[in-house]
Amino acid sequence: MRVALATLALFACSAFVVASSVTAEDSSAGVCQLIPAGGKAGSLDGWKSYHQDGAQTADVWSLNDDGVLHCKGSPLGYLYTEKGYGNFVLELDWRWPPGKEPGKGGVLIRTTGPDKIWPKSLEAQINVGDAGDFWGLDGFQLDGPADRKKSLEHPQFGKLTNVKKSALVERPAGQWNQYKIVADGDTVTLEINGQTVNRATACETAPGKILLTAEGTAIEFRNVRLRPRDKP
C-alpha cells in the first residue's frame, strides 16, 4: 500500500513539474520544488520572464546558493512558470531585503492571455501594508464579502476587483513571511504566517501560469513549492 501511494504521488507531481532539471519531488506528499532549494545558483530552468524595456531574466532575477531568489524590482515585469496550473497548494516565503525600503510585489495565479503589465490573473498582494489582499486583474472574476469587496475600471489595467484581507499579519521588512495559497475549484484561500487572511469565491478556474512580480521594489523569495490538487 505504501508503495502504491508513493507511486501515485510521484505521478501527480511529474504531471505538473515545472522542469525536471530543477524540480525536487517529495513522493510522500506530491510536493514539487519550483525554485531549487540550493546548490544550483543562477539556474532558473522552467521559468521565463517578461519585462519592460526588453530586459532579460538575469537583468532582474538572481538565485544564490542558499536558494534565495532576489528580484531587483525593475524594470517592471515578472518571472513566470512555463506550465499552467489549476488546482494546487502553493507555498513560498518572501521578504523585503534587509536594509531596503519595502514597497510593491505580488504572486499571480491562473494567469492567462498575452504578456503585459498586468495580465489576466488573480493576484495575492504583497504590497507593504496590503499583504493578503486579492486582486482580480484585467477582468479576472472573483467574489468575496461585500464589506471587503470593490470593483473599478482602470484605463490601463482594465476591470479590477479587490477583496481586502481580514487581518494584517505581515512581518517587518527584513523578516521572512510565509504564504500559503490554496486554489480549489472556484475558491482560493490565502494564509500568511499560518493565519487565514482572505478567501475569494466564484473565481475563474481555467489553469494558468504562476507569476512572481517585479514592481519597482527589491524583494526576495525562497522555498517556492507546489502540491497539485487534481479535480475529477
Image (spheres, rainbow, N blue to C red):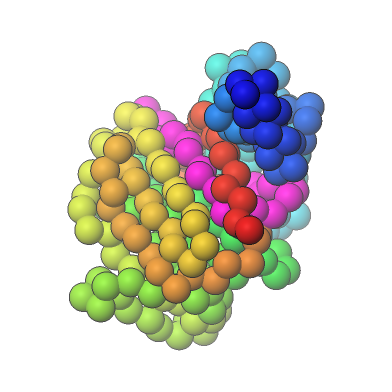
Q: Is residue 94 magenta?
A: yes
Q: Quadrant of residue 121?
A: bottom right
Q: Which stretch did the figure color magenta?
A: 78-99
Q: Quadrant of residue 138?
A: bottom right
Relative side of 129 to 211, left or right:
left
Q: Residue furthest front?
A: 1
Does residue 188 appear in this view? yes
Residue depicted at x 31% and y 57%: 198
Residue depicted at x 63% and y 67%: 206
Q: Nearer the viewer, residue 153 or 231?
A: 231
Residue depicted at x 79% and y 27%: 21
How many labels were placed on the picture? 0
Say if 15 sits above or below 37 in the image.
below
| Quadrant of the drawing holding the C terminus | bottom right
Say if 225 sits above or below 50 in the image.
above
Relative side of 185 to 94, left or right:
right
Does residue 127 appear in this view? no
Q: Nearer the viewer, residue 211 or 188?
A: 188
Q: Looking at the picture, how far across and down is residue 228, in whole percent? A: 60, 44
Q: Looking at the picture, how far across and down is residue 69, in whole percent? A: 57, 31
Q: Looking at the picture, how far across and down is residue 176, in whole percent? A: 36, 30
Q: Nearer the viewer, residue 176 or 225?
A: 225
Q: Nearer the viewer, residue 173 or 124?
A: 124
Say if 39 sits above or below 180 in the image.
above
Q: Is residue 55 magenta?
A: no
